[in-house]
Image (cartoon, rainbow, N blue to C red):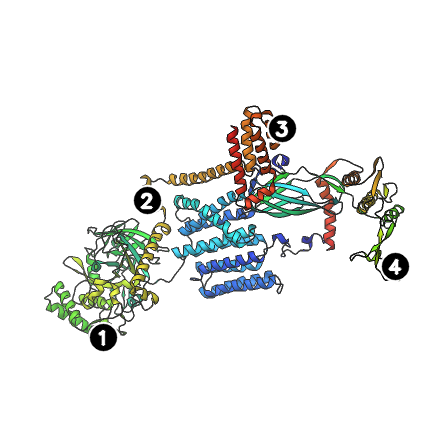
């Protein structure tokens, strides 16, 4: 039902897809109009009649204004960076369409964000807490508005066909491991001679001994090292599966930072040594999907997040 | 976990903590407070001025609370505040069941609501309550000034709702409010005209307001107080020409009973209990008792008056509403007037013709003792006249005229049991009541049935030359008393004041200007009367006010009916219902058309639309775009197939690609007033023309 009623992301909101219902305040307004009308009738008061009719007309007009505010709006969701389990999935909600639209609430899962459209565009970041790794489909996004009087709620569901990948939570084990040494090794290249000191050179690279001898500041030059390559092995890590995956993720990130090339060995899957964004994506994906490759609905994620959130709130 | 569920530890009176997007900010709170002040201002003319105090205190508390100086107002404080307001109103009015006190309580609660207004929901409720409080001000006044002020206040409240719904700035809220109010105006007006005006569904408490005007009994001194007021008494609009100034005797009631000091009314009830007989002997419903011919037809716009009296020019003959025609030739409505009301009348312009025997006897009654000199004087005068009542009256008139009697609104006080003697022979100073009451006393003492008539004399002509000056406005300073005497088989009007101050009769009360005491309470308004331009302005304003009263405030079922009859020649109840339904159907239809029309391509790019038109044309010749083919590559493919148009098509593909994909050009275009996109459109249509 919900899928059928919703529109695809990027498509303009069509009037047939806009739902409308009065808010509790809208019902209060109806009672108010009836009260004023009774006042007008019983006291034979023309201005009370007029006020009652005016409030009624305002309610009618506000439905059209409300509809006009939301119709034709398009929604786009753009992933903002990578998401790791236990962290936050950051998204950018982008609304476009009308030259001007006000007070549009975007709801996705448990988070909501209020947006405005100025000069045809409006965007805002949203963050969804995530607890589990894997590939998920986002829940339908709800666009909602009570503009301009709060008498009616207009909303529409937007189905965003965007699978999101949640990577394992990167965590280094407490004790240093053998393979880590190889990582550290590559941080400095080989010594390749001296050159004159230039303001801004790191003090650690200044040849202080040379300065002591000659009184001249010179900087040690290092050659860009040949990239070391390393194998990230599931079997070499410790702990249970999630801990191992977390460690591997942390190592991937560290290797990326130090511009090392790396390969990944998982039980039943091996990714050859390589480098670059595509490789990194492949590796992280393999880690995220390890042990199950189905696309999970977002509700699973939400159920896992709920107790964590509560625990977090209790702390504060 | 348990602490995580904050509502577990929350007590029942504590409210759910608010998330930031549910809480009202400074801007909204300030707006709400100003709205409250505006609504309160509509009431302060009638309400005790201290009602502004809770508003100020509540605002102060909220201000301090927002700055974290004081805690949130607890339930005890709020209850105490409401109790204090209620107590104050009780002291002010003496009881709580009076409508004024109830309105006061409503206003007070509305103002104190600010103390607990934290969430957006509360803010909306405050706005909604504001409309109720606003409407309760209409019970006091429905004039154009009130209506304008109410529009302002209602607009402000609606602005508050827009602000709460998410407007970022006040200016934005104002613009949306203007749109909403402007667009809803036609529907409102339609409903106002078409919605059937029902009679009151049940009895409601009414306002009891002190009104100035004629009083039930007169002892010299009362009408002078009226002379000090320039308040409007009523207005009249004549079907034909206005009566002459000296003929504008508006009879309101007669005074027949005299106890030696005060003159009082012989009301039908009083007469029936004293004389017995059926009630219809003293008052009849429907047509007037008098057989005279109607001379004046007019419509009265009556000011609110708790008493049922209705003025008429001479004896009333018929009216468009049910009324009681009293045997003394005056008119009584069936109920008191709480609001201004319209009444159509026709009347004879003369005192009533006949008087039954019992009435003639009644109008001869005098106290047994007191005022002996006056009695002797009357007998003497009757003797001189040779027993002719007309001659007696002529002599009396001459007496007032020749002797040094003065017309003054500030006569010396008369006390004791012989006030007629004192006035007639000693002070010789007084106003209409003195002359009228003395004349009645003398006539009765001489054996002529006579009674005093209280009412108004005069009226200021209203309406420009276009409408032929057919309107009169009668003010409290026009109040007057005169005499009716019965001789020759009918009642005759006799105004002794004419002997002393003929200009009062010929020119109306304004001739009294300069008299000490005349309009002493009117202040600045007296000044405006002396200035012809201001007086003109005032007349204009009063004409407008009169129209407003007739067409807006007085718009009831009868007016609705006459409007339909004027437009369609006939009126039926069902038509109103159909009219309302038709109006709503119209609105829905217009709305649906708008929705469907703009639902088509609300946001599609102008360039895409232009391309689609061309693609449709190409499709007819079998050159339509393939599935998933981009506009640019489609046009280039067509260019390869149509070598004769290759140049135009390649240019077109460039234009359309620039048009669609070049966002910078787009933005630049919209900033530079769309000149670039306009030139592209021009280029496009030129190429399209060449192609075809």
Query: Which residue, given by chain and number where applicable, does mark 4 sit on?
Result: A210
Query: Which residue, given by chain and number where applicable, does mark 3 sit on?
Result: B627
Does residue B469 appear to the left or right of B382 in the view shown?
A: right
Of label 1 and label 3, which has the lower sequence position? 1
3D distance between C-alphas at marks 4 and 1? 132 Å
The answer as to whether the residues below labels 1 and 3 share one chain is: yes
Of label 1 and label 2, which has the lower sequence position? 1
Query: Which residue, given by chain and number where applicable, does mark 1 sit on?
Result: B427
10 Å neighbourhood of mark 3: few (<14), some, or many (≥20)?
A: few
3D distance between C-alphas at marks 1 and 2? 56 Å
Front-most of residues B582 and B544: B544
10 Å neighbourhood of mark 4: few (<14), some, or many (≥20)?
A: some
Rendered position, B256 above or below B464: below
Residue A21: x, y in percent? 56, 42
Instruction: Give the label on residue B562, or none.
Output: 2
> Measuring 34% from the left and 66% from the top, which residue is drawn there?
B524
């Amino acid at each position: 039902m919900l899928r059928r009623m919703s529109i695809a992301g990027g498509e303009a909101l069509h009037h047939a897809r806009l739902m409308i219902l009065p808010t509790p305040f809208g019902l209060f307004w109806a009672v108010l109009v009836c009260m004023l009308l009774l006042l007008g009738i019983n006291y034979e008061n023309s201005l009370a009649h007029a006020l009652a009719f005016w409030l009624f007309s305002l309610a009618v007009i506000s439905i059209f204004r409300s509809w006009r505010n939301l119709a034709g709006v398009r929604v786009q969701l753009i992933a903002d960076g990578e998401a790791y389990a236990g962290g936050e999935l950051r998204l950018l909600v982008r609304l476009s369409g009308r030259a001007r639209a006000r007070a549009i609430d975007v709801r996705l899962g448990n988070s909501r964000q209020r947006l405005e459209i100025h000069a045809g565009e409006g965007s805002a970041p949203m963050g969804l807490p995530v607890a589990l790794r894997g590939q998920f489909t986002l829940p339908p996004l709800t666009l909602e508005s009570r503009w301009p009087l709060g008498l009616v709620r207009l909303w529409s569901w937007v189905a965003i066909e965007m699978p999101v990948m949640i990577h394992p939570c990167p965590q280094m084990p407490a004790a240093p491991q053998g393979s880590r040494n190889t990582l550290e090794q590559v941080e400095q290249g080989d010594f390749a001679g001296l050159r004159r000191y230039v303001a801004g050179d790191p003090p650690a690279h200044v040849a202080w001994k040379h300065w002591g001898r000659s009184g001249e500041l010179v900087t040690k030059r290092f050659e860009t090292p040949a990239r070391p390559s390393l194998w990230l092995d599931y079997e070499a890590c410790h702990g249970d599966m999630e801990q191992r995956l977390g460690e591997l993720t942390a190592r991937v990130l560290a290797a990326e930072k130090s511009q090392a090339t790396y390969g990944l060995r998982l039980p039943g899957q091996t990714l050859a040594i390589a480098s670059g964004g595509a490789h990194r994506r492949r590796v992280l994906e393999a880690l995220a999907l390890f042990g199950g490759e189905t696309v999970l609905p977002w509700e699973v994620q939400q159920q896992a997040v709920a107790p964590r959130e509560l625990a977090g709130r209790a702390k504060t | 976990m348990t602490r995580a569920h904050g509502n577990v530890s929350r007590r029942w009176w504590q409210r759910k903590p608010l998330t930031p997007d549910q809480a009202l900010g400074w801007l909204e709170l300030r707006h709400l407070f100003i709205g409250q002040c505006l609504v309160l201002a509509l009431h302060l003319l009638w309400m005790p001025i201290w009602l502004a105090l809770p508003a100020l205190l509540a605002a102060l508390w909220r201000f301090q609370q927002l700055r974290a100086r004081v805690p949130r107002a607890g339930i005890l404080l709020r209850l105490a505040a409401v109790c204090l307001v209620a107590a104050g109103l009780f002291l002010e009015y003496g009881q709580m069941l009076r409508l004024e006190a109830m309105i006061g309580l409503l206003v007070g609660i509305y103002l104190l609501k600010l103390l607990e207004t934290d969430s957006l929901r509360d803010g909306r409720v405050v706005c909604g309550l504001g409309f109720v409080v606003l409407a309760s001000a209409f019970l006091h006044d429905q004039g154009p000034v009130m209506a304008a002020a109410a529009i302002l206040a209602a607009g402000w409240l609606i602005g508050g709702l827009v602000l709460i719904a998410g407007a970022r700035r006040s200016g934005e809220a104002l613009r949306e409010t203007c749109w909403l109010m402007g667009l809803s105006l036609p529907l409102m007006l339609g409903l106002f005209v078409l919605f059937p005006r029902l009679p009151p569904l049940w009895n409601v408490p009414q306002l009891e307001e002190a009104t100035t005007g004629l009083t039930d009994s007169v002892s010299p001194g009362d009408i002078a107080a009226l002379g000090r007021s320039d308040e409007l008494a009523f207005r009249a609009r004549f079907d034909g020409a206005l009566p002459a100034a000296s003929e504008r005797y508006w009879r309101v009631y007669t005074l027949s009973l005299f106890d030696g000091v005060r003159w009082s009314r012989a009301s039908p009830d009083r007469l029936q209990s004293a004389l017995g007989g059926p009630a219809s002997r003293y008052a009849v419903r429907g047509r007037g008792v008098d057989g005279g011919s109607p001379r004046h037809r007019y419509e009265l716009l009556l000011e609110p008056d708790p008493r049922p009296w209705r003025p008429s020019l001479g004896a009333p003959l018929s009216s468009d509403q049910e009324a009681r025609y009293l045997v003394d030739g005056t008119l009584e409505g069936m109920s008191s007037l709480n609001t201004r009301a319209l009444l159509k009348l026709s009347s004879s312009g003369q005192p009533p013709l006949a008087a039954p025997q019992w009435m003639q006897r009644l109008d001869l009654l005098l106290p047994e003792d007191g005022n002996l000199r006056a009695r002797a004087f009357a007998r003497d005068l009757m003797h001189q006249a040779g027993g002719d009542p007309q001659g007696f009256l002529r002599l009396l008139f001459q007496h007032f005229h020749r002797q040094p009697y003065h017309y003054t609104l500030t006569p010396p006080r008369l006390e004791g049991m012989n006030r007629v003697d004192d006035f007639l022979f000693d002070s010789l100073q007084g106003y209409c009541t003195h002359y009228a009451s003395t004349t009645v006393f003398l006539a009765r003492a001489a054996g002529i049935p006579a009674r005093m008539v209280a009412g108004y004399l005069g009226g200021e002509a209203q309406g420009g030359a276009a409408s032929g000056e057919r309107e009169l406005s009668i003010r409290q300073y026009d109040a007057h008393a005169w005499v009716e005497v019965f001789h020759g088989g009918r009642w005759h009007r006799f105004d002794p004041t004419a002997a002393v101050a003929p200009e009062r009769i010929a020119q109306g009360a304004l001739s009294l200007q300069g008299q000490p005491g005349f309009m002493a309470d009117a202040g600045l308004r007296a000044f405006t009367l002396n200035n012809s331009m201001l007086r003109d302005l005032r007349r204009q304003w009063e004409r407008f006010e009169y129209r407003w009263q007739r067409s807006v405030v007085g718009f009831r079922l009868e007016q609705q009916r006459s409007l339909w009859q004027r437009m369609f020649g006939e009126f039926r109840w069902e038509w109103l219902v159909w009219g309302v339904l038709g109006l709503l159907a119209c609105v829905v239809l217009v709305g649906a058309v708008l929705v469907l029309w703009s639902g088509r391509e609300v946001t599609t790019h102008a360039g895409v639309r232009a391309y689609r038109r061309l693609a449709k044309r190409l499709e007819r010749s079998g050159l339509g775009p393939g599935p998933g083919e981009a506009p640019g590559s489609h046009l280039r493919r067509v260019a390869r197939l149509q070598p004769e148009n290759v140049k135009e098509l390649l240019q077109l593909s460039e234009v359309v690609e620039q048009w669609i994909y070049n966002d910078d050009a787009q933005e630049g275009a919209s900033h530079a007033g769309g000149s670039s996109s306009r030139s592209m459109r021009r280029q496009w249509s030129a190429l399209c023309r060449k192609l075809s």
